[in-house]
Amino acid sequence: MISKKPVASPQVAVLGAAAMDWVARVKELPPQDGIAYADQYIPMPGGSGGNVAVGVAHLGHGVRFMGVLGGDESGQMLLREFEEAGVETDSICIEQAQRSASCFIAIDEHGERMIFSLGGAALYENSEEIRSDWLAGIQVLFIADAFSEVAAAAMACLDPKARVVFNPGGLMASAGEAYLEPVFRHTDVLISSKVEAEVMTGISDVEKAIETLARRGPKVVAVTLGAEGVLIMDHGKIARVPAILAKTVVDTTGAGDAFSSGMISGVLEGLNWTDAARLGCAVAAIKIAYLGARGGLPDRRQAQEVLNGINS
């Protein structure tokens, strides 16, 4: 029996989804109408919001997860994973008659992958379901996949000094400017992939996309570029933070979530935005050497050792 990690007083609240990832390892991803043989097929906890919550907990901060799970075996496994990581679970709703959200993920020998979302119970759907006591004392609210009105309700419960970090993900990024505007207006830090930034702006030039996103409200905009690092805008100036390259790439699933976990930790530590992004890059570099969206998530000491190795 695996013991549960003691739950620390939450500094961070994560509003988003957890899901069960069914991961298939293949030699190479198949072409259209092709076939690939899997040498491994296993269930692993995932979902962007859930990944970030566990990542933040591993880095030593108290965190609460605000989401929905089904009453099936996958939901039980996801809940157990949160408890073992020390994530506060009193704000998780269990819908007994529903199945939990899940994804099918095929990963090739280079760590590249294809993801298919299968849906299921995952998100709070009504703003009335958000309780103000869940946000009491919270220093950072991280919003991943969420309905806009639910995100707005959560932000309304925050202390004025609390920070909002928003990572809309692929599905929310495609919802349109009008849908995202209420969240953007109160966002301190927007984190996006290059693809998501283009979807949200219709602009392929990353720097121009960042400038457009910043005009919509976020004070800081960070766009992840994979092996090319991160572009981050702060006070109107764009800086590039180089990626920290892993010696071995096993699985890039969850790399963006690992980066977000490091950024949140940096916010809590009072780092400047560039250093917070460097910490995020270190966390992501460690994670991608392991299988699964949460595989290899480091503690703060391990992340610092990577940073020290880069600076030495």
Image (cartoon, rainbow, N blue to C red):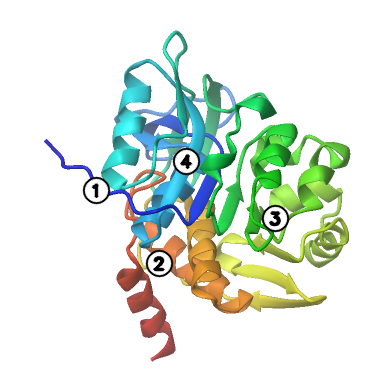
Where does label 1 land, which residue? 5
Decide: few, some or many residues near mark 3? Use Cα within 10 Å; few <14, some 14-19, many ≥20: many
Where does label 3 land, which residue? 194
Name the N-terminal-most of marks 1 and 4. 1
Label 2 vs label 3: CA separation? 20 Å
Label 2 vs label 1: CA separation? 29 Å
Where does label 2 land, which residue? 246
- Tell me whether the residue at label 2 lies in contact with that at label 1, contact meaning CB atoms closer than 8 angstroms: no
Name the N-terminal-most of marks 2 and 3. 3
Near-viewer residue (265 or 160)? 160
Q: Nearer the viewer, mark 2 or mark 4?
A: 4
Q: Quadrant of residue 237?
A: bottom right
Residue 144 place in picture, x, y as percent: 60, 43
Decide: few, some or many residues near mark 4? Use Cα within 10 Å; few <14, some 14-19, many ≥20: many
Residue 64 place in picture, x, y as percent: 45, 45
Q: Residue at x 62, y 37 (%)?
A: 145
Near-viewer residue (226 or 120)? 120
Name the N-terminal-most of marks 2 and 1. 1
Asked which secondary structure carries label 4, the reply is strand
Q: Nearer the viewer, mark 2 or mark 1?
A: 1
Q: Is residue 199 above or below residue 307?
A: above
Q: Is residue 276 above or below residue 76?
A: below
- Tell me whether the residue at label 3 lies in contact with that at label 1, contact meaning CB atoms closer than 8 angstroms: no
Query: As drawn, is 258 to the left or to the right of 154?
Result: left
Label 2 vs label 4: CA separation? 29 Å
Asked which secondary structure carries label 2, the reply is loop
Label 3 vs label 1: CA separation? 36 Å
Q: Quadrant of residue 199?
A: top right
Where does label 4 land, which residue? 65
